[in-house]
Amino acid sequence: MSNARRIAGGLIDRDQRLSFSFNGEAMSGYAGDTLASALIANDRRLVARSFKYHRPRGIFTAGSEEPNALVQLRRGSRQEPNTRATVTELFEGLEATSQNHLGSLEHDLLAVNDLLAPFLSAGFYYKTFMWPAAFWEKFYEPIIRASAGLGRLSGEADPDHYDKGFLHCDVLIIGAGPAGLSAAVAAAEAGARVILADEDFLPGGRANAETCEVDGRPAAQWAAESAARLAALSNVRLMTRTSVYGAFDHGIYGALERKTDHLEESDGRPRQVLWRIYAKRAILCAGATERPIAFSNNDRPGIMLAGAVRAYANRWATVPGSRIAVFTNNDDGWRSATDLAALGVEISAVVDTRDITPPASVAGAAIAMGSRVTDTGGRKGLKFIRLADGRRIPADCLAVSGGWNPNVHLTCHQRGRPAWRDDIAAFVPGDELPPGMIVAGAANGTLTLGATLSDGWRAGNAALASLGISPRDIPRPVADDEPAAISAFWHVRDGRARAWLDLQNDVTVKDIRLAHQEGYRAVEHLKRYTTLGMATDQGKTANVGALAIMAECTGKSIPETGTTIFRPPYTPVPIAAFAGRSRGRDFRPTRLTPSHKWSEEQGAVFVEAGQWLRAQWFPRHGETHWRESVDREVNQTRGSVGICDVTTLGKIDIQGRDAADFINNIYCNNFASLAIGKVRYGLMLREDGIAMDDGTTARLAENHFVMTTTTANAVSVFRHMEFCRQCLWPDMDVHLISATEQWAQFAVAGPNSRALLQEIVDPDCDISNEGFPYMACGEITVCGGTSARLFRISFSGELAYEIAVPARYGDALVRALMSAGERFGVTAYGTEALGVMRIEKGHAAGNEINGQTTARNLGLGRMVSKQKDCIGNVLSERSQLDREDGLALMGFRPVDRAESLTAGAHFIAARRNPATENDEGWMSSVAYSPVLGHSIGLGFIARGRDREGEVVRAVDPVRNNDVDVEIISPHFIDPEGKRLRA
Amino acid sequence: MIIEHPLLGPRDAAEFTYLGDAAMIDRPDWQSGDAIREFHDYLYLRDNPAGEHRELWFHEQGDRSWLVVTRNTTTHEITKVELARDTALASGRHR
């Protein structure tokens, strides 16, 4: 429980001690620590193994760019792999474990890979896993799968929940470092609606990690005061722990806010919130990321970025070594040496690649100007460094600075390209920024504090000006500029061992040279061939160094070599956050029919039909198999009467002076002549002549129609009709309203259906066969005055009606119908019995109107009117769609009546081979007909109408079925339609 | 993306469904002598420009207006949004 490496000062709360564990070892830290700073304070150097070679690795950075210190947090269902220790806020009881090793972290058996390194060069798997082909599945794939990935998923459902939200603002400021705070004060004090987002839990950015002053106060204090001042303004939303991960079109930004990641328990609050921020202007103040220099064995635990070492000391009061050396090519690296020396830390050497006068003096340190680190030693942690002149200098921590890369990522999310600036040896935002974006501070290449503050102020005022808001005349924050000269230096050539560029993916200088040698020179090829810049850090510390090596190989400049395309997300976003609440049952809405509650009471089995839950069948006591229930429902309906909820069918209310003409143009058959009080079956085509949907349309009044669509196509048919109305026939006086959910509708089918209805329909409504014949419709009242609509239509082939009442009466109506039907032995029937009866009757449904079939295929060719314009009629006449010998919808029954049919079987002429060239069509729907006592099917077969009586094979190789079937009429029951008209 | 709806102001693109080329408005005459070829071209031959494109969007999660949106396919810049019905009427479409 020691904090051996803790020093005085810092921004941690020493009154709040927190215990945590790493690989089971109990440790402690303080509130304000990250897991990384607490591990350093506990003198934990080895925290991970590298991806490919399983090299020992330590903490490398102090921010979201961390390539090495990926750990697994928590356990059980909350286990979370690949978490960066550098951005994990410490909390009481945090359990962290290392990952990507076989055996213990200290003795990883897969470290043997490091010895095999000569065989594991860039692209090795393209070369190695090629031959023999027989090894692909059985041998190579299991090996690759086992070694792929880093951490492990729990395999359990995530018990936390995640939310999504929407925010709007005048100015979104991304990053609350010196530039961001300066810009935010300028914009917010003038009255703009400001959102200030920062990925850290403490606003201030580098101000918290430095010893500089702003406005005469320590920078961290200035940052805290500025943040408090902003948070107090009602027009400001200060969002900490919030990463803006993407810049999308039209000023929309994606942001991930970690609400309770830093707490032991989320207590019912969302773990994370994914925000969509609509910003009129955005100011990117994302800062800069330090980059390393490549040299032999530069990946040992203890070798870190210089700015990170300084941040750990200044902000977190912990020093990652007792003898620290610095290797730099710029003035900023020296600040790590001077800051640490001022804190009393021993600096063993400062090595600068530049042959200049030392910019500072560091007591007790060996100063090597114009020199290089050529090698390092220490197996599981740095012990010494070797310089170009051969000197061996003891050091347990090496702070490396190769310069700072402005975080240009979000400026490139809309394909902008960064530009190169020689004076800072780095890419800066290019000319083409996402519209509405302004860049300020280090992200803009302004790397010194005083300049950054004024750049932020400028950006804040520029945003105000473009929004027409007057700035307030208040003093802007002021600070000195620190020395920041740099001389580009990428790679120490004198050194024999591997020099790492990308620590996360184990990409070395040699790999880049190999890629060049093998022709993978374009940056996008380089990335894919070597895996440079992939995985969780996306090469934030690696890419520019690798580009420099490639530039060196090709003899081009770095800007000529170019960067790969930056894409969102800037930092990883969990899939759970994208899913939000849309998981499990909440993946999409569930729509319940008006009779749902009643059906549940009856013990109905439900089936999903799109978003709807429909009763599939209603098992009665003693029924043990679904077929028993379905057969009974069919027999009762055909024998007496049955009731089915058909509310899910789409209902479109069509009104207007031109309603009849409009419908006439939508359906392929004639509707202009439909009389008031009548219903007609209609078939809709797509413009290409293929059948789209079918249904019935009732004419309730001269200018008032009600159309039904299939359940599945309710939305797309409505959209199509609105297209026709607005875009094709804009002069028509016609209006459409979707009324699907306004009406509860029930089919009442069977010979006793009229008698049953007479029990509930008010006596003044005549529903006799004469007064209300087949295909009649009308507005009636039921149960003593409740308005209803009655349609005499039949999907079952029986005497049948559909009765609709306002949806709120649906539950009452089903109960009234069922109780009135008791004396007839009424049954409720579900979608299965509905399907059996429509197949028995030969009605097409979704299996037949499947987007491949024409009216002619469906046996409805004569319905397509040639006398009028309608969608699809012209192209339905194309020769190949209109073939005499085309597919025809027919009925099929097994020659051996005991055999069952399967949908999806293909028809093969008798004594032919079941092969593609002999394929004559397919079975689309099958059912067991309880009335006929055997299996029946509907299907499409070539020249079907000329082949009634012929026996063909129905071959289903998938289910190993091969049945001789007889081609017959698709109307198995009552082909003359006598029952409907009874 | 944000679409500036002529009636409702700025709306998120997620509220819309996309159909495609606004040339879908120019449906040929069914009685033309060469109707099959004209309908074929209307239905299948579309331009796919890199740059400005007039296209049809349906405000399905909104007021159900069909809109003609002029959008640059390379930058997603939207320069014009009209009610498709107005466009259709202006081009002389009638039943």
Image (tube, grey):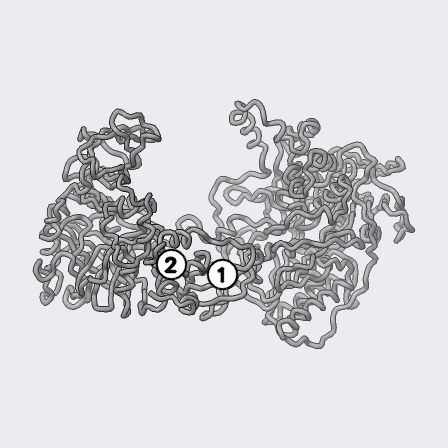
Question: Do pointers 2 and 1 mark residues of a single chain?
Answer: yes
- Of the image marks 2 and 1, the number of the one nearer the N terminus: 2
- Out of A174 and A435, give the one closest to the viewer: A435
Residue at image position (72%, 42%) is: A546
Chain bearing tag 1 is: B
Q: Quadrant of residue A373?
A: top right
Residue receiving disc 1: B54
The reply to whether dot 2 and dot 1 touch (C-beta < 8 Å) is no
Q: Amino acid at mark 1?
A: Arg
Few, some or many residues within 10 Å of mark 2 (<14, 14–19, 20+)? some
Q: Quadrant of the N terminus of chain A?
A: top right
- Out of A655 and A853, give the one closest to the viewer: A853
Residue A91 higher or lower than A741, as above or below: above
* Closer to viewer: mark 2 or mark 1: 2
Q: Amino acid at mark 2?
A: Pro
Chain bearing tag 2 is: B
Tag 2's secondary structure? loop
Q: Measured from the top left, where is residue A316 in percent x and y?
A: 72, 52
Residue at image position (45%, 52%) is: B45
Q: Residue furthest right?
A: A357
Mark carried by residue A378:
none
Residue receiving disc 2: B28
Q: Measured from the top left, where is residue A389 in percent x and y?
A: 90, 37
- Out of A72 and A68, give the one closest to the viewer: A68
**With A207 as the anchor, is A887 left or right in this view?**
left
Residue A255 higher or lower than A455, as above or below: above
